[in-house]
């Protein structure tokens, strides 16, 4: 791989080794490679093209009897615009390619071509942290992803070496870790959580025994809880967001694109979820209730599986989108968003 072309190097035919007198170099593609180390993901080679804004999947093609490249960024070119500086392959528990954007944003690509899954996503760090490098290390049943994150804390530049928690934490919501650069206390019940010197002076989000706790400011490496708890996660907050594409529901004379539409009801199918907000945009969201009258008020809300029906506070527009957000340090997994709408023909 060079800045102008990609080549294969062999000893000639079959398994013949490369020797000083037996060298065969063939130009395969002419994409040109950027200054990011290529990697192997399944049966494909993943490379960053020169210019650092396009990610190529290089595979062998039987029809051409050679290597071909597919542009993986074609459906989300805006996410890599400006260039990427590093990448790593996480194979367990999910197939994900992770990229470091030149502006310090963490960008992920769910990459499972055998099941026709290609999906991009971004992961901004808490307190505007800047990701500088990334790697993955096998650790038991998962590939643990480590990052070096630069932040400004107490007017000083610091770097946190962090790793991603396993997304499969079990069935107890108290074990859900959804804070950034955080730590976990797991012992006898207490109101004092110490050892938070790396977050000195910062406002942190807290999950105490599976229930959201009011935010606190770290002072002297300590936060004092409003109530005692035995399992506590403390770290930076972050929002998880999703927005649907523009609605295509059909119309009397063809498609509904470009026509006035109104969503009057939405059903969201969740699994292992506590807490969510739904609305037409980020400025107009209604919180979905997950606690009902049968649940004790002094216990955490258990994780919910099933459908939640929402009376949608939507007006009339051409887009008809649905926006879902989670702002609490709690799990949210969406399986489906089902809209009920009307299209108005001109």
Image (tube, rainbow, N blue to C red):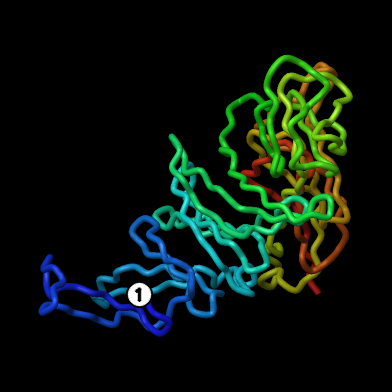
At 83% from the left and 55% from the top, the residue drawn is 155
Query: Of 262 and 15, which appears nearest the observer?
Result: 15
Q: Could you tell whether 175 is left or right of 46 in the image?
A: right
Which image quarter is the C terminus in? bottom right
Does 106 sit above or below residue 268?
A: below
The residue to which callout 1 is attached is: 68
- At 74% across and 23% down in the image, what residue appears? 209
Looking at the rendered structure, the secondary structure element under dot 1 is strand
Q: Where residue 9 sits: x, y (%)?
A: 23, 74
Image coordinates of residue 276 in percent, x first then y, are 77, 41
- Left or right: residue 58 compared with residue 74: left
Residue 161: % across, % down: 62, 47
- Along the line of sight, which residue is nearer the eye, 134 or 153? 153
Q: Which residue does the image show at 43% across and 72% down from the upper left? A: 70
The answer to whether residue 343 of the structure is visible from this angle is: yes
332 horizontally vs 36: left or right: right
Are there few (<14), some (14-19), or many (20+) residues within 10 Å of tag 1?
A: some
Q: Residue at x 30, y 79 (%)?
A: 28
Question: Which is nearer the eye, 79 or 307?
Answer: 79
Quarter of the image holding residue 2?
bottom left
């Amino acid at each position: 791989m060079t800045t102008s072309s990609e080549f294969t190097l062999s000893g000639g035919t079959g398994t013949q080794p490369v020797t000083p007198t037996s060298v065969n170099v063939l130009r395969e593609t002419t994409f040109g490679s950027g200054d990011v180390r290529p990697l192997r993901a399944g049966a494909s080679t993943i490379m960053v093209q020169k210019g650092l804004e396009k990610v190529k999947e290089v595979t062998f093609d039987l029809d051409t009897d050679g290597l071909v490249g597919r542009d993986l960024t074609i459906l989300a070119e805006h996410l890599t615009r400006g260039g990427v500086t590093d990448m790593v392959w996480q194979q367990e528990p999910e197939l994900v390619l992770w990229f470091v954007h030149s502006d310090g944003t963490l960008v992920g690509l769910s990459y499972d071509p055998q099941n026709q899954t290609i999906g991009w996503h971004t992961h901004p760090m808490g307190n505007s942290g800047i990701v500088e490098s990334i790697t993955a290390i096998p650790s038991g049943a998962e590939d643990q992803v480590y990052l070096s994150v630069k932040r400004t804390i107490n007017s000083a530049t610091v770097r946190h070496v962090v790793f991603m928690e396993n997304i499969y934490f079990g069935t107890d919501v108290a074990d859900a870790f959804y804070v950034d650069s955080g730590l976990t206390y797991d012992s006898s019940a207490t109101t004092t959580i110490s050892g938070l010197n790396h977050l000195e002076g910062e406002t942190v989000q807290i999950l105490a025994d599976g229930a959201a706790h009011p935010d606190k400011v770290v002072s002297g490496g300590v936060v004092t809880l409003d109530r005692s708890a035995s399992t506590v996660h403390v770290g930076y907050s972050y929002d998880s967001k999703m927005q649907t594409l523009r609605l295509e529901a059909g119309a009397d004379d063809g498609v509904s694109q470009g026509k006035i539409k109104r969503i009057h009801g939405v059903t969201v199918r969740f699994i292992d979820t506590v807490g969510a907000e739904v609305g037409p945009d980020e400025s107009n969201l209604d919180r979905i209730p997950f606690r009902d009258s049968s649940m004790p008020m002094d216990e955490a809300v258990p994780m919910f599986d099933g459908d939640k029906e929402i009376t949608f506070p939507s007006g009339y527009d051409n887009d008809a989108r649905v926006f879902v957000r989670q702002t609490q340090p709690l799990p949210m997994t969406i399986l489906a968003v089902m809209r009920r709408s009307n299209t108005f023909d001109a």
